[in-house]
Amino acid sequence: MQNSIAVTVAAFAVLLHGVTGLDNGLALTPPMGWLAWQRYRCITDCETYPDECVSEKLFMNAADLLVSEGYADLGYKYVIVDDCWLSKNRSADGKLEADKTRFPSGIKALSDYIHSKGLKFGLYQDWGEKTCAGYPGVLGNEESDIKQFVEWEVDYIKLDGCYSNVRDMDRGYVEFGKLLNNTGRPMVYSCSWPAYQEEKGMRINYALMAKHCNLWRNYGDIDDSWTSVMNIADYFASKQEFWAKHAGPGHWNDPDMASTYLLIGNFGLTIDQSKVQMAIWAVLAAPLLMSNRLSTVRPEFKEILQNAEIIKVNQDVLGIQGTRVFRDKGIDIWTRPVEPVHHGNYSYAVAFVSRREDGAPYPYKITLEDLGLNHRIGYTIKNLFDKSSGIKHYALPKTVVNVRVIPLGVVFLRFNVITIKLEDDIYSSPLLNKTVTFT
């Protein structure tokens, strides 16, 4: 391979240390939780769809299942109410009101219920005259609306951008964030202005965004399909040299205009395609917000969503966004520097993603050296989707890794730097000189 892949990654890592995030101490790792939009959109007919309509019942059930099904223990903490929760008009005194039929107990009661489960409560609004679905937006009422958010003990604000002037977003979103900070209540702040300005061909001030937002949405709504997932991955890869340097603890790129929905457990992805989404989202340090029907997620999909090793990659405290570093023979290679670090040598998560559709698993060989892994003491290698193998593989930069990737599937490996020199007999072992195969 002509160029060392590590050069680009190392450059990103250096730049990240100079970025200052929103000064609220929140989202030091990408937020995790459950959000309604992708799966439930704006279903408001509770008579016809009592278990699917946007209502307090839907979010209370989600909170119950996050806890009872073990998601909360793994970090899925946020329950986020999206669009269509509001009444069509403000109250007589100008306040926001939830739809009284679908949220009869009110937003504060819902917030209290979610908090009683040890979870955090998120709420959608829009920096415009109306939300995208036509409900009252915050424009012109920012201070009074934020006062209500504080009274409701909101922990996370997702601020959309419909029915607003894109030229004013740099000012408006910044001012809104300052108002949030001035309340003294810690609220994660999810901004949307790049998704709206990008489609207008505007130059986006990501440095300003990283200073004032905890996360920002870069792409249009994700659909429940493999094509949609890979379109987002390709778009992120095309922008990565500019975007990745602005991500880090407290400020994250979000690969979807409507938040980073994990489609896993819905209708559109196979098991192996679901593994691909989980792997790429972990490499991208993307927020992990499920949007599915938690009560019907099949065990094989639940196992993907609850893969503690992959969640550990996503939540790595270094906060370095990974990138797609090589494309060859229908295989995309994504890498992310992670802990532990030894004398400036990073550990890495590496995803080999197949774009091939030719039927058989495809064998792909590459040395650690060509992946940019040059730590002379070596690495241990772990297959993050293979729980059956307890074998620890040791590898040096010259070691060849052979992955057999099924069509539209992934092999996801973690290479941890060895921090102390091993016994000499380990270094003379064939394990360090032969091809190591993963499937």
Image: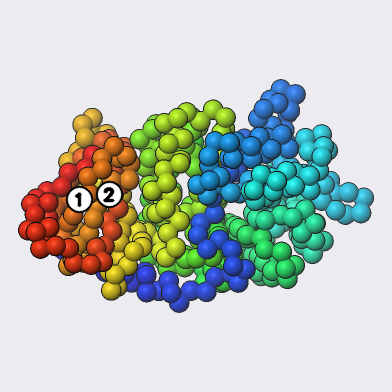
Residue type at mark 1 is His
Colouring scheme, one of rainbow, by chain, secondary structure, one colour: rainbow
Residue closest to the eye, 305 or 149: 305
Label 1, secondary structure: give it.
strand
Vertical arrangement, residue 277 with respect to residue 9, above or below: above
Q: Are marks 1 and 2 in contact (CB under 8 Å)?
A: yes
Along the horizontal axis of the image, is 100 left or right of 291? right
Give the vertical position of 344 relative to 228 (above or below): below
Q: Which residue is mark 2?
A: 382
Q: CA distance from mark 1 to mark 2?
A: 7 Å
Is 204 situated above or below 430?
below
Q: Earlier in the sequence, mark 1 or mark 2?
A: 2
Q: Nearer the viewer, residue 301 or 75?
A: 75
**Residue for badge 1:** 393
Question: Is 148 positioned to the left or the right of 286 in the image?
Answer: right
Residue occupying image coordinates x 12% and y 48% = 435
Query: Residue 262 in the image: x percent, y percent?
Result: 49, 42
Residue 185 rendering spot, x and y as whole percentages: 71, 64
Q: Quadrant of residue 31?
A: bottom right
In this picture, residue 144 sits left or right of residue 306: right
